[in-house]
Image: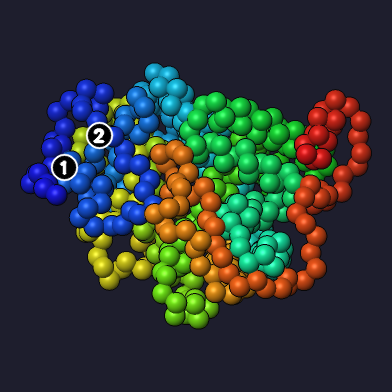
């Protein structure tokens, strides 16, 4: 493959809307870093940022180097509020199915400055309470229940039956929800990432309605859960801020953690060598997760930053109102990232950087490590049932994710007698209450 010697946009001369935008490379199960990577092609063609069409009709600057990505994540002249984005006001974002993910809501994710700090503090403090309480035993119990449900069969879909269930069942404890309600919320939130307006928009409306009722319920009957802690926090969040904060945590936390688990397992199980079976029981899981963050991060691209004024990112001029998509995958593949720090956790940008660094990073990491460890510990001789190139990517341009991860293994025995996952009971009892609002919520609890 031949590459042009110099990047085209070392000095940008015209607005993004007037430039020739490249199509965003699609997720590829066989993708590997190197000279044949589409990100390397774009770097050689454009330099540290490239004009791309992230979805039909939606143009952004995409960061392609580690330096540009870190700078864009931390730049004070780039906002997280999409109301600064020309594409948002044009209606093209909604038409492309990106609105549920990028719409401005009253949460920490899409706010800046003092408003961001006030909205973020209750979530940070609530997560600190969960950490202090210790989630390790609960995570272990949930992983064993999930693995017990298929270990006797000798085959399973480690995405549908494990990875997408584990994080939400942990989060359900934090929200005070039954297992059934948690799984339903995960199903709705996952529709955001497919970027299909026909399914994403109704899912967003249903999620918002649910969290509105949950917030009202927690205010009437407070308990030891995130919603109750956010209500009583000194930041004095409004009903809308609490609702939108809880909603954003589910939408971002479950899918990305689930696919980090799955992508780590893909990296570990892809080697067909027969002798690698015993080695898996001694693998350094933390190192395997860090490698997955680099070569197959669950969030490959994220349209999250918007210029509030003309600004410069890595020598490229960004016009006011233009969007910058964070290229997590190309940043971690940047050849300029020194090889000797390739495995260093502090160089990972997977959870962001700066003031908007993900507040749930530690919990997500613990869920991922424990989930992967449990699979390697409990499944005997696990192997992919398909070649990696046969795995089908999830639809949508933003995720590095698969629809399913079929594996085979030697059948084993359940760790303990466990009940099947189902609607179950709420995590804490509530007084019964009659009325229209309560009846609507009961339909959810009993789904």
**Is 34 placed above or below 140 here?**
above
Viewer-nearest residue: 360 or 158 = 158
Q: Are marks 2 and 1 in contact (CB under 8 Å)?
A: yes
**Residue 414 % position (x, y):** 73, 70
Question: How far is the residue under mark 2 from the one under mark 1?
Answer: 10 Å
* SS category of the residue bearing label 2: strand
* SS category of the residue bearing label 1: helix
Instruction: Identify the residue at image location x=81%, y=34%.
Output: 443
Is 389 situated left or right of 195 in this image?
left
Viewer-nearest residue: 178 or 248 = 178
Is 305 situated left or right of 214 in this image?
left
**Residue 166 % position (x, y):** 63, 56
Q: Residue furthest top?
A: 90
Viewer-nearest residue: 261 or 103 = 261
Q: Which mark is residue 22?
A: 2
**Residue 261 % position (x, y):** 52, 59
Viewer-nearest residue: 161 or 359 = 161
Q: Which mark is residue 305?
A: none
Q: Is residue 371 visible?
A: yes
Quadrant housing residue 61: top left
Instruction: Identify the residue at image location x=57%, y=41%.
Output: 190
Is 426 situated left or right of 50 in this image?
right
Question: Count the marks: how many?
Answer: 2
**Residue 172 % position (x, y):** 70, 50
Instruction: Identify the residue at image location x=43%, y=19%.
Output: 91
In the picture of the structure, the residue carrying the numbered disc 1 is: 45
Quadrant housing residue 170: bottom right
Q: Residues within 10 Å of mark 2 (few under 14, many from 20)?
A: some
Instruction: Identify the residue at image location x=49%, y=71%.
Output: 285
Labels 2 and 1: the sequence-earlier one: 2
């Amino acid at each position: 493959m031949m590459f042009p010697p110099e990047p085209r946009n070392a000095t940008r001369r015209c607005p993004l809307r007037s430039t020739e935008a490249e199509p965003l490379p699609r997720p590829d199960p066989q993708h590997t870093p190197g000279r044949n990577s589409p990100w390397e092609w774009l770097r050689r063609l454009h330099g540290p940022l490239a004009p791309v069409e992230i979805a039909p009709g939606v143009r952004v600057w995409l960061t392609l180097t580690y330096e540009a990505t870190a700078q864009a994540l931390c730049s004070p002249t780039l906002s997280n509020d999409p109301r600064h984005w020309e594409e948002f006001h044009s209606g093209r974002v909604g038409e492309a199915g990106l609105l549920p993910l990028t719409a401005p809501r009253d949460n920490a994710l899409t706010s800046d400055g003092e408003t961001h700090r006030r909205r973020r503090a209750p979530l940070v403090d609530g997560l600190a309470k969960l950490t202090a309480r210790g989630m390790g035993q609960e995570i272990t119990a949930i992983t064993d229940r999930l693995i017990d449900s298929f270990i006797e069969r000798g085959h399973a879909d480690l995405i549908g039956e494990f990875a997408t269930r584990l994080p939400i069942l942990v989060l359900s404890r934090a929200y005070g929800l039954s297992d059934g309600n948690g799984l339903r919320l995960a199903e709705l939130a996952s529709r955001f990432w497919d970027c299909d307006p026909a399914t994403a928009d109704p899912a967003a409306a249903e999620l918002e309605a649910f969290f509105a009722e949950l917030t009202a319920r927690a205010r009437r009957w407070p308990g030891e859960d995130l919603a109750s802690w956010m209500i009583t926090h000194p930041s004095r969040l409004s009903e809308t801020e609490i609702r939108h904060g809880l909603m954003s945590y589910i939408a971002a936390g479950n899918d990305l953690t689930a696919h980090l688990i799955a992508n780590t397992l893909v990296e570990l199980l892809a080697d067909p060598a027969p002798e690698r079976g015993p080695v898996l029981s001694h693998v350094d899981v933390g190192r395997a997760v860090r490698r997955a963050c680099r070569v197959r991060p669950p969030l490959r691209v994220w349209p999250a930053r918007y210029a509030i004024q003309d600004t410069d990112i890595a020598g490229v001029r960004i016009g006011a109102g233009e969007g910058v998509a964070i290229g997590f995958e190309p940043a971690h593949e940047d050849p300029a990232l020194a090889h000797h720090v390739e495995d260093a956790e502090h160089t990972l940008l997977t959870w962001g950087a700066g003031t908007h660094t993900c507040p749930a990073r530690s919990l997500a990491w613990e869920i991922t490590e424990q989930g992967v460890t449990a699979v390697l510990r409990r499944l005997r001789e696990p192997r992919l049932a398909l070649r990696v190139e046969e795995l089908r990517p999830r639809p949508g341009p933003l995720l590095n994710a698969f629809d399913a991860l079929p594996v085979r293994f030697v059948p084993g025995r359940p760790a303990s007698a466990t009940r099947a996952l189902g609607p179950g009971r709420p995590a804490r009892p509530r007084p019964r209450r009659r009325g229209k609002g309560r009846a609507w919520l009961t339909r959810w609890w009993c789904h």
